[in-house]
Structures are given as structure tokens and as C-alpha cells.
Amino acid sequence: MKLLVIGSGMMGSAAAYDMACQSQVDSVTLADSDLKRAQDVAARVNRIVGAKKVRATAIDASREKEAVRLMKGHDGALSAVPYFLNLGLAQSAIAAGCH
């Protein structure tokens, strides 16, 4: 299973860790507007779980077309960004066919 976490703050980093610990999860994409933070969190999670399951990428979560492109190919996405972005991200998930 390929999962996506949008937001690499406290909630997003914890979610990425929980996902990476699951044997049925093949990979986790951790996306954030701050690529450096996403990279740091991905490296920390990979080090803790002892596997390279998490990769970082940049996203502007307010740009629905960008979110659709990123969500395609993922089995599921989790939003860990401010609530006002969730409606657009939900619409993007529907358009991408991503849970």
C-alpha cells in the first residue's frame, strides 16, 4: 500500500511514523510546503523504523491541481494541515481517486 501524508508538523510526522511501522505499507510520501522540514522528518522516521519507507516532497496544499497530481498513484491520503485546506484536499482526493 502506498500512502500520502500532507503536512509534516507534529500530527503529520506522527502519522507518517505510524504508517511506516505497518508491514502492509510499502511507502509513505510526506508532503509539505517546507521541503526541508519534510526531508528532516522523513529521514528521522526512516532511521527510527529501520527502513527507507518514507520519502519527502514539496506541495502547496492550497493548489488543488497540484494535490491531484500528487495523490494519483497513492492508495490513501491523510491531511495534517490547517482545517481551511481540507475541503480543497477532499475535492482533490475525489478527483484523483484516492481515499
Image (cartoon, helix red, strand yellow):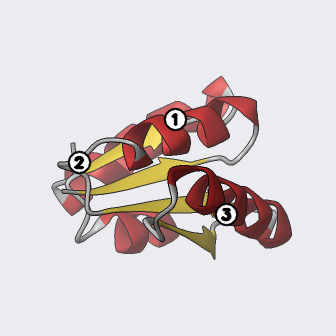
Residue drawn at (60%, 33%) of the image = 14
Q: Are marks 3 and 2 in contact (CB under 8 Å)?
A: no
Tell me the crowding category of disc 3: few under 14, some 14 to 19, or many 20 or more residues within 10 angstroms, Cα based: some
Q: Residue at x 53, y 42 (%)?
A: 17
Horizontal side of 20 relative to 62 (left or right) equals left
Q: Earlier in the sequence, mark 2 or mark 1?
A: 1
**Which image quadrant for residue 36?**
bottom right
- Residue 99 is left or right of residue 82, and the answer is left
Residue lying farthest top? 83
Labelled disc at residue 60: 3
Q: Earlier in the sequence, mark 3 or mark 2?
A: 2
Horizontal and vertical percent position of residue 29: 47, 63
Quadrant of the frame with the C terminus: top left
- Residue that label 1 marks: 15
**Is there any visible trace of residue 63 in the rendered image?**
no
Q: Which residue is mark 2?
A: 23
Task: Please name the residue shown 20% across and 54% down the image.
Answer: 75
